[in-house]
Image (cartoon, rainbow, N blue to C red):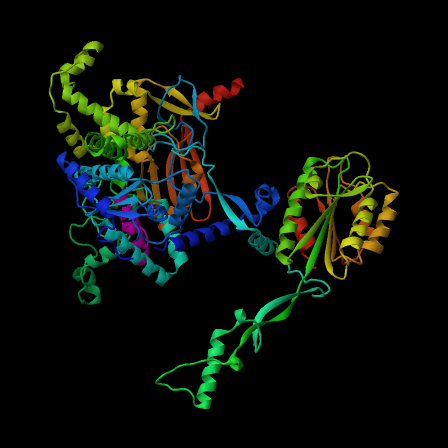
Amino acid sequence: MPLIQSSNLTPELAAMQVEVEEYARGHGLDFYPTIFELIDADELNMIAARGGFPTRYPHWRFGMEYESLSRGYQYGLQKIYEMVINNDPCYAYLMRCNGPIDQKLVMAHVYGHCDFFKNNQWFSHTSRKMMDETANHGTRIRKIMDKVGVETVEEFIDACLSLEDLIDVYSPHIKRRADRKSSTLNGEREEEAKKPRRFRSKDYMDTFVNPRELPGEKHDVEPRKVPEHPERDVLLFLLEHAPLDGWQADVLSIIRDEAYYFAPQGQTKIMNEGWASYWHSKIMTTQGLTTADIVNYCDHHSGTLASSPTQLNPYKVGIEMFRDIESRWNRGAFGREYEECDDDAERRRWNTNAGLGLEKIFEVRRIHNDLTFIDEFLTLDFVREHKLFRFGYNPGSEAYEIESREFPQVKQQLLSSLTNRGRPLISVTDGNFRNRGELYLKHEHSGVDLQIDYATDTLENLQKLWNRPVHLETIVDDTKTVLTYDGEEHECDYGESLSDLFDFSEDSED
Amino acid sequence: MDIKRDQRRFKQIVRGRIRDNLRKYITHGEMIGRRGKDLVSIPVPQLDVPRFKFGKNGSGGVGQGDGEVGSPVGKPGQGPQGAGGAGSEPGSGHLMEVEVTLDELAEMLGDELELPRIKPKGNASVEAEKSKYNSVRQTGPESLRHFRRTYLRALKRQISTGVYEPLEPRVIPIKADKQYRSWNDVPIPHVNAAVIYMMDVSGSMTDDQKEIVRTESFWIDAWLGSQYKGVQRRYIIHDAVAKQVDEHTFYHTRESGGTRISSAYRTAAQLIDREFPAELWNIYCFQFSDGDNWGDDNRQAFELLTDRLLPRVNLFCYGQVESPYGSGEFLDSLEKQFAGNETLVLSEIPDKDGIYESIKTFLGKGR
């Protein structure tokens, strides 16, 4: 399918775009050219099912996603209002059946996102030609499928997708080590290349003409540890060391590229949506609305920001945080003097007319991600005002219950659920475990156990790529546990319990 | 956009998944309540790409709203949690409904149980006439005029008579050129099947047994339905006396009292006499009981079976479900009496897991 280069907006909508774009620029938003595409609900579901890219590689998962989206839409349970693609130019989709005020709101919202994509540092390493790249990925994978067979490739993609979270989200921003070409583990070929040519010699002279070892060479060199440091980019490690066929490496690198592309969106969900909501709200309420539209706008806006007890709405928290920051920096309510003030009433009244709010939020949107955003700007007052609480699973009642409304607990919980995009931190610690070429991963346990059935299934997929036995070290019920899969059967090795003694005394009481 | 391809592939995978788990579905009868006219919707566990993810215990998130510490915020499975947080999908019991046609289901059943196709008895002795418009004639109403053929004939005539002028091609049909569409009566072989279900509803049959019967007959129905067009179903319940009932009553009646199997046989025989002449119908009888027949009734029952039922049916299946009061002796008696009879199929269903084998026994004959 050819990429649509020009937009298909109706004249009214095109005029609206010009208007909204003007407002957005007026507020200092800075974005790539934005192309709006008017499509109907079914097309939107199709595109959404593919993560926003109409021309991605074929995979059943997209079909499943589409089925569930279109069913949800059919039953009136869900409806996608807006979708923006981080690309240059930015692509955004408008749903044909939305009313004009909705379209305007979506446009304003989209410009917020576009500004965020372009300026937030966490997006600085994402490809801005992803629309083209995903299309290329699609072509590459289709070609491979033609050559190797659809099912073989699909199975391999399934295995790769199962591992796609195992990337190092910070690596685009830090150079952790020198780039390495893919090599085999034992490095034999390298050794051979280094060997000096043998000279011709008579038998009895051979040991002198061609000495067994180079002068000064040490015999017992410690074998290089692979990897030298624990490697969080498991996909990269596999690319460099797993015994993959050419096409397999190609597929894996595609999956990895796309995982890296999507990662910042997971890292900045609250900020991104908050920022876009902040701007749609500002643009609409100060410029975009006539009195006749206000009810429609409010209806939609409040629907977007609705909060629920079990789901922290990133739109809501994000917009309120940005507003909170803006107001604090406008009042000068920051810095040492303010922090040290104990008088609640005085803190409330605090106003130095600093007027730095707008400048501050632009700075925040440039340098922060959700994790640092919450860490830096979530305050006690904010948690109280917005009635945030921490909840947890109570096995007794089999329900999720409110555990605490204390600021430190709430913040701690929020931070830990944002760490590594809410996924377990897992790294390769040994690529030659037991000196048998087995792969050893370690889960950095942070208080929550892994879901074991998923973990064992994932190990199976990992083993498909590695071909030798794979291990995962984690902690289950306070016990160090190593899960192993060797290609045929699973093994679960429980180590020493950290709370053995405790358990024992409890048992004897029963 | 080839999302359709992805969707098709997804559906293929789902069907594969159903096929793999068919035994479980057969045994647990989960889908019976989900039956529409031609479709059955089947709950399939969400096909998930497995990942390393956090489990439920010790997981939690941050929410927003009122409530005291300790008050519940939601049961597992109620929407996503937290800020994409730990355990963001509590209780992964995420089921997806997939719709399959009954025919497709029967197909899967047939593959799974390796059921032979049924060869209808008495060939296609019943024929319905159906009109098919597949010929032409010279006469007919103008509304049926075959335009192309008419003009073709006119053209031919004009060329052969030399009236036709290529420079001024004007074709005018005359009456003799006119062709009309016409029909032929095509005999369509119409094979009918009648299924008669009989169930013992005496006191010793509990709800569990009925559930087994219900599940088993659902699958039998699905299979026979795929093999014949237009299956007629009749239901007979009996304790000491028998009566014909509708489907709902069949599964939901509980009587007390004794058991006289012959009563059901007599009713079935009368039913066949009245409605299903054996020359025209493929008749199937399925009888379910716990086998606890009144002793003096056996002789009568066997007589009826020998004289009036077995000669006329394709298949007579007797399934003996085990009740809490144990299994009766009717099965053994039948076996002794009718050893070697091809038409009579016996099967013992000790519990739900026995359904699978039982269906295989009943339908494995291909009759």
Residue at left offset 33%, top offset 53%: A57
Asked whether the viewer can see residue A86, the reply is: no
Give percent across and percent down for residue A410.
32, 22
Residue A135, image quadrant: bottom left
Give percent across and percent down for residue A155.
40, 53
For the residue pair A229 and B68, the one nearer the viewer reads as B68
Residue A177, image quadrant: top left
Residue B206, image quadrant: top right
- Is B212 placed left or right of A443 in the picture? right
Give percent across and percent down for residue B213.
68, 43
Q: Which residues are magenta?
A: A236-262
In the rendered image, the quadrant that contains the C terminus of chain A is top right
- Is B265 placed left or right of A292 in the picture? right
Instruction: Count the labels in the image.
Output: 0
Residue A34 higher or lower than A368, as above or below: below
Asked whether the viewer can see residue A474, the reply is: yes
Residue A244 higher or lower than B161, as above or below: above
Residue at left offset 84%, top offset 48%: B301
Residue B145 higher or lower than A269, as above or below: below
- Is A461 placed left or right of A111 in the picture? right
Give percent across and percent down for residue B34.
56, 42
- Magenta-span inclusion, residue A291: no
In the rendered image, the quadrant that contains the N terminus of chain A is bottom left
- Magenta-span inclusion, residue A258: yes
What secondary structure is the stretch in magenta mostly built from? Answer: helix
